[in-house]
Each structure stands twice: as structure tokens, then as C-alpha cells.
Image (cartoon, grey):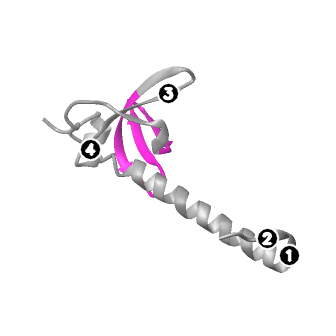
């Protein structure tokens, strides 16, 4: 399909632009979703921050990002910047008291 944009009016060009932007956003969303689908709550992950590797635990898979806990910090990171680490998933706290103590009850 070939469109001669030289013959389109301003209104037609604006409509075409909106349709193109919507399509790009849709395709970008599919790609992000595919990246997110590789992760689950409890996965151990790694990412770069200020040139150093940071390891953490996925605590939530959001619509566009991952929520990752690293020790006493919390990060919200797009999945394309996160690498899943090998090994079993970590056990997550099931209670607020566990979180305050720093881990699940023994």
C-alpha cells in the first residue's frame, strides 16, 4: 500500500499521524508485555545502576515495569533493563511483620 502524502490535506495528515502514533504505541506495548511475561514475583534479578550491578527480588509485576526490592531500597524498572538470575525463586514475606523483620518467618 502506497500513500502519496503530498496530496493529503492538513486534516488527513493529522489523522494519519494519530493512527501511526497509536500503532507505534500498540506495538511498543506488545514488546513491553513480552518482556514482562518473562518475570514472576519472587524472581531474583540483576540490573545496572551507576555502572554497578545491583541484585534484587521482583516483588510486583506492574503494567509496564517491575517493582524490585534490593535490601532496604525499592526500584521501579522497565523490564528491558532487568536480567533474571538463575536459581530458585526466593520465598517472599506473607505478612507485614515479616517485611519489618527483613524476611519470612522461620
Measured in 3D between alpha carbons, the distance from the residue under mark 1 to the one under mark 4, in whole angstroms, is: 67 Å
The reply to whether callout 3 and callout 4 are in contact (CB within 8 Å) is no
In percent of width and height, residue 64 lies at: 48, 54
Whichever of labels 3 and 4 marks the residue nearer the N terminus, that label is 3
Question: Residue under circle 4?
Answer: 97
Whichever of labels 3 and 1 marks the residue nearer the N terminus, that label is 1
Question: Residue under circle 2?
Answer: 4
Question: Residue under circle 3?
Answer: 48
Whether the magenta-drawn stretch holds residue 73 is answered as yes
Whether the magenta-drawn stretch holds residue 75 is answered as yes
Measured in 3D between alpha carbons, the distance from the residue under mark 2 to the one under mark 1, in whole angstroms, is: 6 Å
Tell me the residue at 35%/42% (across/down).
58
The magenta segment: 55-78
Mark 2 Cα shell of 10 Å, populated few (<14), some (14-19), many (≥20): few
In percent of width and height, residue 30 lies at: 47, 58
Question: Residue under circle 1?
Answer: 7
The reply to whether callout 2 and callout 1 are in contact (CB within 8 Å) is yes
The reply to whether callout 1 and callout 4 are in contact (CB within 8 Å) is no
Could you say which quadrant of the image residue 5 lies in? bottom right
Amino acid at each position: 500500500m502506497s500513500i502519496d502524502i503530498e496530496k493529503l490535506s492538513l486534516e488527513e495528515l493529522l489523522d494519519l499521524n494519530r493512527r501511526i502514533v497509536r500503532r507505534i504505541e500498540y506495538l511498543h506495548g506488545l514488546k513491553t508485555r513480552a518482556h514482562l511475561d518473562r518475570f514472576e514475583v519472587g524472581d531474583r534479578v540483576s540490573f545496572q545502576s551507576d555502572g554497578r550491578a545491583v541484585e534484587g527480588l521482583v516483588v510486583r509485576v506492574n503494567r509496564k515495569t517491575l517493582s524490585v526490592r534490593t535490601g532496604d531500597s525499592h526500584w521501579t524498572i522497565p523490564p528491558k533493563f532487568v536480567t533474571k538470575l538463575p536459581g530458585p525463586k526466593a520465598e517472599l514475606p506473607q505478612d507485614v511483620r515479616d517485611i519489618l523483620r527483613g524476611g519470612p518467618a522461620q
